[in-house]
Image: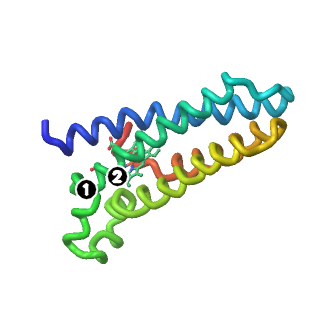
Amino acid sequence: MDTYKIILEAHSGIAYVALITIAIAVINSLIGISAKNEFKPKDRRIALFALIATHIQFIFGLILYFVSPNGMDAFKSGMKAVMSNEGLRKLAVEHPVTNIIAIVLITVGWSTHKRAEESKKFKKIAIFYALGLILLLAMIPWGNWIG
Ligand code: HEM
């Protein structure tokens, strides 16, 4: 198997872990908010696990961008060729750009929850992680992945 295939396999697999752990962190925070629970070390660990999975996925995504024919290489045939091809535009432009924004949002959620007072911690995680998750889900190339 070549480098491209290995990285693509890793990126496809870690995608499940990242999306599921972010979803769990959002659900856990919503439960915490509605039950007015205290923010415990367990809640911090759930949010941290999602953050780590997301950052690992980011690193694999970045490597993938440079080894995949559907990343930077796609631009060899010109910007117009990429932008006029729906599938290629999604993989080489929309997916990476939107997902980097989503990852920044999740990271901001993690950092602001740390500084927030006790009663606001769940809210920070719920809002930023949920926004990130929506962006990620909107830009998954579903057909290539599980289609
Ligand atoms: C949490 C964030 C991310 C998730 C959940 C995610 C998920 C996925 C999934 C499910 C695929 C389809 C894989 C397949 O065909 O089996 C994919 C493809 C791809 N991703 Fe990501 N991704 C993320 C972030 C990124 C980032 C930040 C970049 C680049 C900077 C990136 C670059 C790519 C590229 C270039 C492909 C197409 C690979 C190919 O078909 O050759 N991804 N991603």
Which amino acid, mark 1?
Phe
At x 59% / y 47%, what residue is drawn?
A: 106
**Ligand 1: does it lie within 8 Å of the C-beta at label 2?**
yes
Residue 70 horizontal side relative to residue 37, left or right? left
Colour setup of the view: rainbow
Above or below — where is 31 with respect to 75? above
Pick the quarter of the image with the C terminus: top left
At x 28% / y 58%, what residue is drawn?
A: 71
* Quadrant of the rendered image containing residue 36: top right
> In whole angstroms, how far apart are the C-alphas of marks 1 and 2?
7 Å
All told, the count of numbered labels is: 2
The residue singled out by tag 2 in the image is 62
**Foreground pick, 45 / 86:** 45
Residue 45 horizontal side relative to residue 2, left or right? right
Residue 133 horizontal side relative to residue 73, left or right? right
**Foreground pick, 52 / 135:** 52
Above or below — where is 125 with respect to 71? above
* Quadrant of the rendered image containing residue 91: bottom left
For the residues labelled 1 and 2, say whether their Cβ atoms are less than 8 Å apart: yes
Which amino acid, mark 2?
Leu
Q: Could you say whether the residue bearing mark 1 is in a helix, strand or loop?
A: helix
Tell me where residue 116 appears, x and y as whole percent.
77, 44
Q: Residue furthest left?
A: 1
Residue 66 image label: 1
Tell me where residue 125 appears, x and y as whole percent.
69, 41
Q: Could you say whether the residue bearing mark 2 is in a helix, strand or loop?
A: helix
Q: Residues within 10 Å of mark 2 (few under 14, many from 20)?
A: some
Residue 114 horizontal side relative to residue 50, left or right? right
Above or below — where is 38 with respect to 93? above
**Foreground pick, 82 / 124:** 124
At x 41% / y 41%, what residue is drawn?
A: 57
Pick the quarter of the image with the N terminus: top left
